[in-house]
Amino acid sequence: MAKRIRRLIGLALLGALAGCASYEPVPLEDMETTRVAKPLGGETLAEKSRTMQRTHADIVRNLRTLDSMLMRGDDSGIQLLKTSFYAYMDEHVEPLLAKDWTSHHPELAGLDAGIRFVAIEMLSKLESPHRAEALIDDVKLRFRNRGDLMVEYPVGRRTKLDKALELVEEEYWRDDDPEARLSARTETD
Amino acid sequence: MDLRRARRIVLSATVSALALLSGAAAFAAGNAWDGYLDYAYVYSSADSAALKARIAQYGKEAGVPLDRYITEQFETTVDSDEPGPDDELRIRRQAIGYLLLYLASSDADQLEKSVDAIDQLSEQLGRSENHYWYHYIHAHEALELGREHDFVGYVLDLWQKVVVPLEEPYQTMQALSLNDSPAAGFAAALPYLYENVARLILLRSQELGVDSGLDPLGSVIRMLADGRVGGHPDVIPVSASSKEYLTRIIERLDGAESDAGSLTFTLALFEAAKLHDTARSKLASEGLGEATVKALQVASASYQTALDRADTVQGEAAVHTRTLRLLGEIYAAKQRLGVDPEIQTTFTLEDAIDVYTRMADAGDDGWGALGYLQKPDYVLAMRGLWEEIQEASLNIADYYLAQSQALPHKADEHARNAARLYTRYLQLFLYYATNEGKEGVPDSAYFAAHEAARGIGDAYLIYAKHPTSEEIDVAIRQYRAALKIFPFDRQIWPGITAALQRQGRESEYLELVRPAAEGATRSRALTRWIASNEPEAERLKTLVSAFSDSLVLVYLGYAEGKGIDELEAGLSKLTVQRDEAKTRLKSLQAQLAGGSHTAPPAAMSDEGELAGPLGTGEKLDAAQLSQLNKDIDEASALVERLSTQIEARRRTLPLYKSTLETDGLSDELRSRRDHPLHALLRRMYHEHADVDVTEAAY
């Protein structure tokens, strides 16, 4: 209880500072303190791992919601989710996975690939073949010669990366004709 | 309550700190409100009554009420075209102030002012705090205007633009124990933002009657439930958070009672269930008065809204499962309370049966297309719907039986209504309680089938005043079917004898009931149950022993209603009669021995065995001798017959007596759907289901 009261007083002091002196500290979210180029271990790596796990879990929850709306043919809802998910991909997922090291770090590589696979599924179901294809190509490039890497795909199951690639390509890329892909991109992206 | 207290402490402490640090002069009214408004994310999602009280309290503490503070501080200020940093803070506080007034009073004008104010910051959304309030206020506006599409868009934007970017910094600061630091900035508010978003979607949207288009927010709700709401007990105690509510919603959203994961449907059904609970409470406390009837109709209308939102069979099943419970409760209350007010509902048993049929028809290959995520959910939902169909059928039929007694001039009509309902249930049972369809049939359905079959018999034989001979035939057949499903119902045996007596067919009794008794004595499932000492094994063992004796079956059919004392007195009387017969026999034999010219006939001993000749020396003529021999024969036969009867009764009465002690099994099964014996009845039924129980179908 004493600890809690101290914390509340701490908040109160913060309020006092804000209220009396109109002082607003620069929020940490605006600082570039949380981006670490290549953490090799310790708490920073653990944090990165937690962020990636959360991202994976969040995409899975988006996927569950999308599946639900697809089943019910909720086109209007799907459009809203699509807009939101694109923003999520642009502003969070792609920056998170942009660096090469997460795809090679032994503790994160599987998670990195897992995020990409559920994102591919999500984008494919949102009829975004361009973005999905780009992610598939990226996976092939980043994880070349590492087909034995274990990834969580489909959701809830662990498979080898090669098998997961096979699955997404079978499920979402039945048409291997490049012209058909181009046509699909033009129509839906 | 804890959250309210926590918030009060936070804000009181804020004020105290202001006083301490800045001195009395600095503790101007305006400054106090500045603090309250800057931390409004802590308390802004309280319910309107609590918020109103809080704002009034803060007004007292600040020395000026919020509305006046806003007028004095903000409405006299002329806005510049390009708000600077000081203007940004002022405008944000102004917008928050108006929002609080709106939330406390539901005055839409205040919300409009809040929107006008926050819109001035539409170009300054780079700051998380501005971004949050901008979307939060606009989401409220969308709700107020009934624009659910816009509401969903604002909440999704709020999540992507404000919440997601704050999560990583918050996580970092938490790891470094800096989340209480002044440097934490708006990131420290993250646990409150989770809570506010959850309440906005789950509570506020429902308060304002949004019942469509919320499904894209299912992803936000799922993310909130994943350790976000309730995940920061050091900031918001779990008990004060909406975690429990959220968990219940998530269980529904992804469980058997969903509509393929639709949040709109889940919230609609949840709201309807809350109204159902309210109606149920009124029913318990006030009976079927006007207010209760109104509450029941409101609940029913709410369920109709949920049904309208259902896109899948899964959703329809979830609604019908609950509406049938409502329907069953209404009829049970009418019967119990002896009143019969008109209650309008749009749901019928047939609608529910139609949904069940579609579920059953989908089978192993099609259950996924109904909306279910996993097969156990599908099976669970089918069984749940079945149980409500069975309970509603039995409750409504019971109501009609009660009506037939209450209104003697309509006894036949009501009895036949009851029989119709029982018959409908039996048809469903016989169609699906097969090896192929039994998966979706709950264990309790078997006893319910027994009740329905017996109910038909009762309806025609006990409740109807003028049953036709065909109806009596049906009643006898249904009693037999009921007996085969559940032979341990002692009431049904005399029911069969009564029906047979009405048709002068008493002699058929044993022939009709023996198959049911033999079914029980030969049942492998029952034998294993008793051998394994499963629940009620002792009582069942007693009954099975009794069923193997035809005389006990006769007792079960004919002796019901007589006390065991009467039966034992009858046995004593028989013994006396036999003793008298023996005495007479001895006397006759003595006469014969005394006057016989020829060898005496074989005589009986006391124990009924052949005895040697006796002689008295008295002479008898041929006619007397012939008569004496005839009397001796008759007396011997009587003694023998009485001895046989006594022996049979001495053997049977204890068995019958022991069956009396098994009374009550039916009541126990009726009141407990989870009674272990339901599982036994299911096994017994399927041992011989295809052979003879199907005769109940007609």
Image (cartoon, coloured by chain):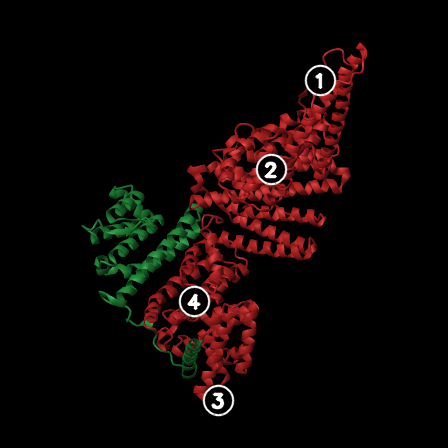
Chain colours: A green, B red
* Mark number displayed over residue B193: 4
Report, in whole angstroms, how far the alpha carbon at label 2 lies from the one at label 1: 53 Å
What count of labels does the image hold? 4
B628 in relation to B104, above or below: above
Report, in whole angstroms, how far the alpha carbon at label 1 lies from the one at label 3: 134 Å
Of badges 3 and 2, nearer the viewer stands 2
> Which residue is painted at 56% across and 33% down in the image?
B520
Residue A183 location, quadrant = top left
Same-subunit check for callouts 3 and 4: yes
Report, in whole angstroms, how far the alpha carbon at label 4 lies from the one at label 1: 113 Å
Which residue is nearer to you in this view: A172 or B110? Answer: A172
Q: At which x and y percent is residue B55?
A: 54, 75
Of badges 2 and 1, nearer the viewer stands 1
Mark 4–mark 2 contact, CB under 8 Å?
Answer: no
The answer to whether residue B97 is visible is no
Q: Quadrant of the C terminus of chain B?
A: top right
Same-subunit check for callouts 3 and 2: yes
Determine the secondary structure under disc 3.
helix
* Mark number displayed over residue B488: 2
Which residue is nearer to you in this view: B444 or B266? Answer: B444
Q: At which x and y percent is residue B415?
A: 70, 37
Amino acid type shown at disc 3: Ala
The residue carrying pointer 4 sits among few (fewer than 14), some (14 to 19) or many (20 or more) residues within 10 Å by Cα, namely many
Q: At which x and y percent is residue B89?
A: 42, 76
Determine the secondary structure under disc 1.
loop
The residue carrying pointer 2 sits among few (fewer than 14), some (14 to 19) or many (20 or more) residues within 10 Å by Cα, namely many
> Which residue is painted at 49% across and 74% down in the image?
B7
